[in-house]
Image (spheres, rainbow, N blue to C red):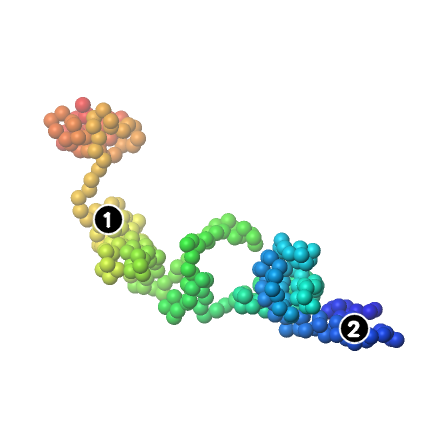
Amino acid sequence: MSRSPRLDLPFVLPQQAQKHLTVNDAMRRLDAIVQTAVVSASTVSEPAAARAGDLYILPPSATGARWSAMKTGALALFEDGAFVEMAPVAGQIAYVADTGAFLLFDGASWTDRPFRPKQADRFAVNADPSDANRLTVAADSELLTHDARTPGSGDARKVINKAGTARTASVLFQSDFSGRAEIGLAGSDDLTIRVSADGSAFRDALRISAANGRVALGRAEAPVCALDVGGPVRVASYARNALPSPAGGSGQIVYVSDEAGGAVLAFSDGSLWRRVTDRAPVS
């Protein structure tokens, strides 16, 4: 055996001439792979002005006079005016200077999987976390999707848990960091949608009772019937010749704008539209 089995370091052989060349070659390799630190693991184009000792992890589709002939994931070391290829060893860890990350070579490719935090007191993506917002994401959009890898059940739920009935579990929508709308359980177990013009005073637009499923519109009080509206109600207006089919369901209510004798509310009995004033069919 003329080379070491793990790091591929050259051995000095018996009766070998110019032993210093072999020793220097081993030292060169050790200098590159011990405490491995690379300039980048994402640079695709071979640098034209690299410095002696610069080391790169080659990404897919690397280009350049030397890099194009090297394997993806190889270590490219710049020495004596040119890049030479070095094979990484399974278990080798590299610090990546341009991202500040650590990568592990698992025998097939480089990965950051072992260095991903399993638990942290705060975490941010493209932003700085704070004591108030320990999880912060700055992005144009975020995606939460079902687990298709484990795989999971195919369901996808976002769970927001509060400590008790009087606490709040909600999603707040802001404009320039000032609240404008809130959906959730705000101080009770009823589902509410609240809106605000100034980020300070909120008013309920919709409340659904957790106790019975009744709905309140435009009022903060608990609804006393299936639909409890805190103000006038407006229904769609139709001319007589444009009324929808009454067979769509009995109990529908519309406003007939040109009924004989004047505009009137009408209801469907399942087959005819009838005036609410005298139950006569709309004519």
Label 1: element kind: strand
> Residue 77 at what x, y percent from top left?
66, 66
Residue that label 1 marks? 217
Question: Left or right: 233 with respect to 148?
Answer: left
Q: Nearer the viewer, residue 79 or 202?
A: 79
Label 2: element kind: helix
> Residue 43 at what x, y percent from top left?
58, 60
Picture quadrant where residue 48 is located: bottom right
Question: Left or right: 42 with respect to 71?
Answer: left
The N terminus - image quarter = bottom right
In the displayed orientation, state which residue is furthest to the top: 283
> Residue 259 at what x, y percent from top left?
16, 27
> Residue 251 at what x, y percent from top left?
25, 34
Mark 1 neighbour density, 10 Å: few (under 14) some (14–19) many (20 or more): some
Residue type at mark 2: give it.
Answer: Thr
Rendered view: 19 above or below 165? below
Residue that label 2 marks? 22
Q: Nearer the viewer, residue 213 or 147?
A: 147
Rendered view: 82 above or below 260? below
Picture quadrant where residue 46 is located: bottom right
The residue positioned 45% from the left and 66% from the top of the image is 123
Image depth: mark 1 or mark 2 in front: 2
In the displayed orientation, state which residue is furthest to the left: 261
Quick check: can you spot residue 93? no
The residue positioned 16% from the left and 27% from the top of the image is 258
Picture quadrant where residue 101 is located: bottom right
Q: Which of 28 and 247 is in front in this view?
A: 28
The residue positioned 79% from the left and 76% from the top of the image is 20
Residue type at mark 1: give it.
Answer: Leu
